[in-house]
Structure formats: structure tokens, C-alpha cells
Amino acid sequence: MTHNAKSLAQQQFGAHAAGYVASPTHRAGYSLDRLIEWIAPRPGQRILDLATGGGHTALALARAGARVVAGDLTAPMLRAARAHIAAELGDSRSVTFVRLDAEGLPFPAAAFDAVTCRIAPHHFPDVARFVRECARAVRPGGLVGVVDQLAPPDPQTARYVNAFERLRDPSHVWAYNRAEWRGFFSAAGLEVVHYEEFDKEQALVAWAELMGCDGPTITRLRALLAQAPQPAAAWLRPQSPASADARFSIRQFLLVGRRAG
């Protein structure tokens, strides 16, 4: 199951790497700004950005003067990130690109001043292990900052929301709720120093097409929005799901933890 999930993620993101470089949701926005604000990168710091995708977080860290390692499971995504960062900075020498599995990092303990991961852990088969690896890789007193999708606390509603996400992207494994994420951090020895939630409004068609969804799949996504039970509708907040301008919201969070010193 774990191997299949990771292979599927590589297929999905390898085929759509360029789209993730250009994606407005990933390229900029509130979650990126707040993650960088809380990590507060400084010149000379060594920072690991996991599941770097199009390289947007790595780029922001490098612009602050940090020495960045950008890691991703998918080789085409790493190539796209390298090209993007080189174009933005004039070169990519301040960033090292490493193909890796976020659940088994190829680095010694306490190798980094901070670890970041933005809009990716819902693709990981073992999020608890991922968080433990982040905590292991960061130095005592260092920070781990994660942005990801949030699931509602009610299990039935969480299943509906996750099914909606998985129809659009079969490599989506599971989005967890606030209590579960805090539990992952606590179990890994990370003291939570900041937590916040925010909504990201999405245009349904553009969101679906980013992952290559065809017309019938988009029709099914519309139906799931239009027919959502009240708790799921309250979470997703659909707007005109039958129209060409259908929109909905994804609830996200920023969680920052400090490793005990």
C-alpha cells in the first residue's frame, strides 16, 4: 500500500510538474508568507524544504539567505523546481536538490536549523513517521513548519471531504484534523509554538484541471459539491457548483513546532 501510494504520487506529480510551478495557489499567497514569517530564515542557516514541488518555499528561503536543501520524491518535479529557482535567482547554487522520501530522510540527526513542508503531507502514507523524521533532522531549538489541508473533526464528514479530494487526485492519501496534527507533533517531541487555520478559495475547474481531470470527473466533482451533506457543505462552502464558475474552499493550517533543546 505504501509503495503503491508513493508510486502513484510520482506519476501524478511527474506528469503535472510544470503546472505546479505556475500554480497561483503554490507560487504565492498567505500560507507561504506566514510560513516564511514564522520560520524567519536568516543568512547562513541550513534549511530543508520537503516535498518542494515547484520550489516556491525553497525559493523564498533562499532569497532570505538560507542554504536550502530542496527535497522531493519526484524527479521531474525537482527538475522543474531547479529551472524555476535558477530563473528567479539567476542561478540555483544556493539551493541543493535531492530526490528523497520524506518518511526516511537521508540526513544525520540535527543537520538543519529548520524543516519546512507546504501543501504536501496529505499525500504521505505515514504522516506520523514524516513528522518524526522532521524532528530528527532539525537541531535542538530548531523549527519545523508545516502547511497542509485540514480535515473536519467528525469522522464521517472527514471521509466525505477526503473522498472529494481523492476523486480529483488519486494520490491524495488523507487529510488529518487539528487534534491529530497536534498529536503528531507532540509524539515527535515538538513543542507547538504556533497554530492557525485559514480558508483557500478554489475555482473548481482550474483546481481539477491542474491534476488532469477530464470532463466526466469534473462533472462528478460538481455533483459531490452540490449533493454534499450539511456538515460537509459547511466545511467545503460550495458556490454555484453547477455553473462554470463553481467555487469552494479548502481549509488549511500552519503548524510550527520547536524541537526541545
Image (cartoon, grey):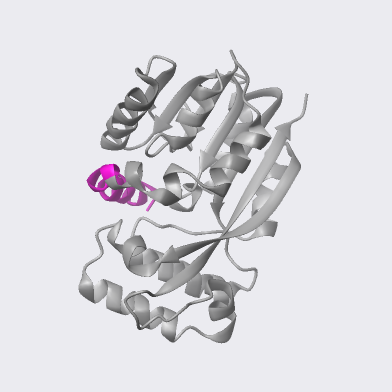
Q: Residue at x 52, y 47 (%)?
A: 29
Specify whether 86 is left or right of 177. left
- Horizontal side of residue 225 vs 152, given as left or right: left
The boundaries of the magenta stretch are 1-18
| Magenta run includes residue 223 | no
Question: Residue 1 at x, y = what percent?
Answer: 37, 53
User: Looking at the figure, which quarter contains the C terminus?
Assistant: top right
Q: Position of residue 10 (x, y in %)?
A: 30, 44
Residue 188 quadrant = top right
Q: Is residue 15 magenta?
A: yes
Q: Nearer the viewer, residue 101 or 119?
A: 119
- Give the residue drawn at x 35%, y 83%: 242
Q: Main secondary structure of the magenta part?
A: helix
**Residue plotted at (44% across, 64% down):** 202
**Res 244 → quadrant:** bottom left
Q: Residue at x 46, y 23 (%)?
A: 69
Q: Which percent across, then down, holds residue 54?
A: 37, 38
Give coordinates of residue 203: x percent, y percent. 40, 66
